[in-house]
Image: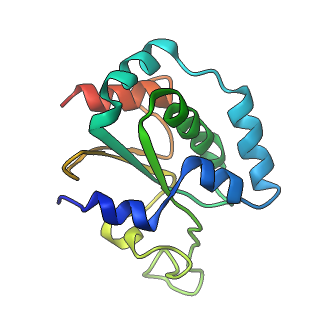
Amino acid sequence: MDVDLSEIRKRTVSTGQYIDGSEEPFKESLVARKQTYQLHKEAVDQLKQFAHSYMVVAFSASWCKDCAQNIPVLALIAETTGLQVRVFGGLMKDPLSHTIKWRIPPSPPEVITFNVDKIPLIIVFDVNGKEIGRIVESAKRCPTLEQELCEIIKSQ
């Protein structure tokens, strides 16, 4: 399924906007992680070469510990490489439903479109809106998020 990336841009915020707009104490943990994380240089150098050809979309929530670890890293990747990273924030579980995981709103309807189960869900799209890979919660195949993004992109 190809998606309209211009529509995604309209319905999301940049990682910087997401961090700046977050409420305490979540914002404090995002900022601290961003200030202390050291990006893997080789992966960053490779991502710079591909940045103009891909877009990353992440689903996040303030209650999610994995989001607090990974969204600041995505912000650093975006700032350092020029890779466009957009965030759907404000996801909320629906405790009143046994069949529907996310409450819409405040969760965006895209949680259904992209079959979001666990977060952060990080999706990599090519410039045509074709999904080329996903990272669920955290990097699994590589030691760092930036290395795994690099591997997804290089596998194309």
148 above or below 117? Answer: above
Tell me the quarter of the image containing the N terminus: bottom left
Looking at the picture, does residue 13 appear above or below residue 151? below
Give residue 96's position: percent from left, percent from top: 57, 87
Residue at point 42% right, 16% down? 45
x, y (%) of residue 75? 57, 39
Looking at the image, which residue is at 41% across and 76% down? 109
Looking at the image, can residue 8 be seen? Answer: yes
Q: As rendered, which of 64 and 56 lies closer to the eye?
A: 56
- Residue 56, percent from left and from top: 39, 45
Q: Is residue 5 left or right of residue 35?
A: left
In the image: residue 63, left or right of residue 131: right
Q: Is residue 115 visible?
A: no
Foreground pick, 18 / 133: 18
* Residue that protrudes farthest toward the bottom in the picture: 96
Residue pictured at 56% horizontal, 63% vertical: 89
